[in-house]
């Protein structure tokens, strides 16, 4: 059953705010290694430009360090390492930050590039393909087919609760 998701455009009121907020079907999109990924918008605290990151000795390999977010200490996670992707030549301090909340704490996911908020119909989400890498399958909740490309949805809880390789 091949269904292609479409990006839904919400009607905008005169004050510029959408009259139909559907957070269950909205995802903050971002890029890692030319792959479009997303996180449910209700799990995202904010998106930040590159930040200064203080290295933390003896931390797990995917922990890039800590950053100061208006007085709050936030753990910066190198999502490339967490997803078993090769490193880039771009220093981690130059990556964009998608700040998420998990277990009462904030974590900054370092990503290559941030995209748009994508609103898709929840009915078009498909199960994770069996051909997807086992490590990715463990932290993915599903996929959408968007205009000739897969939009992979990251399960934030699984991202932090599953062991990394």
Image (cartoon, helix red, strand yellow):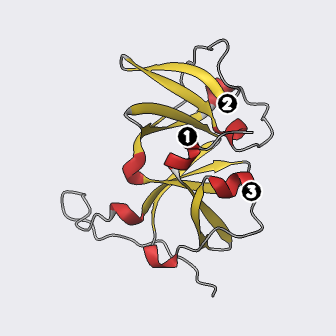
Q: Please report the residue visible at 67 percent of the width from the left and 25 percent of the height from the top.
A: 60
Question: Which mark sits nearer the N-terminus, 3 or 1?
Answer: 3
Q: Is residue 43 above or below residue 165?
A: below
Residue 127, horizontal then vertical, whole percent: 60, 72
- Please identify the residue farthest to the bottom as the structure is shown: 1
Residue, disc 2: 62
Horizontal side, residue 11 vs residue 141: left or right:
left
Which mark's residue is nearer the viewer, 3 or 2?
3
**Disc 3 secondary structure class:** helix
Determine whether label 1 and label 2 are within 8 Å by CB.
no
**Disc 3/disc 2 C-alpha distance (Å):** 18 Å
Q: Quadrant of the C terminus?
A: top right
- Image quadrant of residue 90? top right
Residue 135, horizontal then vertical, whole percent: 72, 51
Question: Which mark sits nearer the N-terminus, 3 or 2?
Answer: 2
- Residue 160, label in figure: 1
Quick check: can you spot residue 121?
Answer: no
- Image quadrant of residue 1? bottom right
Q: Please report the residue visible at 58 percent of the width from the left and 83 percent of the height from the top.
A: 3
Which mark's residue is nearer the viewer, 1 or 2?
1
Give the class, few, some or many, for how many residues have Cα within 10 Å of label 2's Cα (few <14, many ≥20). some
- Image quadrant of residue 46? top left
Question: Which mark sits nearer the N-terminus, 1 or 2?
Answer: 2
């Amino acid at each position: 059953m091949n269904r292609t998701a479409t990006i839904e455009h919400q009607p905008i009121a005169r004050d510029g705010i959408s009259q139909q907020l559907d957070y269950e079907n909205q995802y903050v999109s971002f890029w890692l290694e030319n792959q479009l990924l997303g996180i449910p918008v209700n799990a995202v605290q904010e998106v930040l430009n590159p930040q200064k990151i203080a290295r933390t000795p003896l931390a797990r390999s995917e922990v890039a360090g800590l950053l100061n977010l208006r007085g709050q200490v936030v753990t910066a996670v190198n999502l490339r390492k967490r997803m078993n992707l090769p490193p880039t030549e771009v220093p981690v301090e130059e990556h964009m930050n998608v700040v998420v909340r998990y277990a009462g704490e904030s974590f900054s996911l370092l990503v290559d590039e941030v995209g748009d908020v994508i609103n898709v119909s929840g009915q078009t989400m498909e199960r994770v393909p069996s051909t997807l890498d086992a490590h990715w399958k463990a932290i993915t909740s599903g996929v959408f087919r968007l205009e000739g490309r897969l939009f992979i949805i990251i399960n934030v809880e699984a991202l932090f609760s599953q062991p990394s390789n």
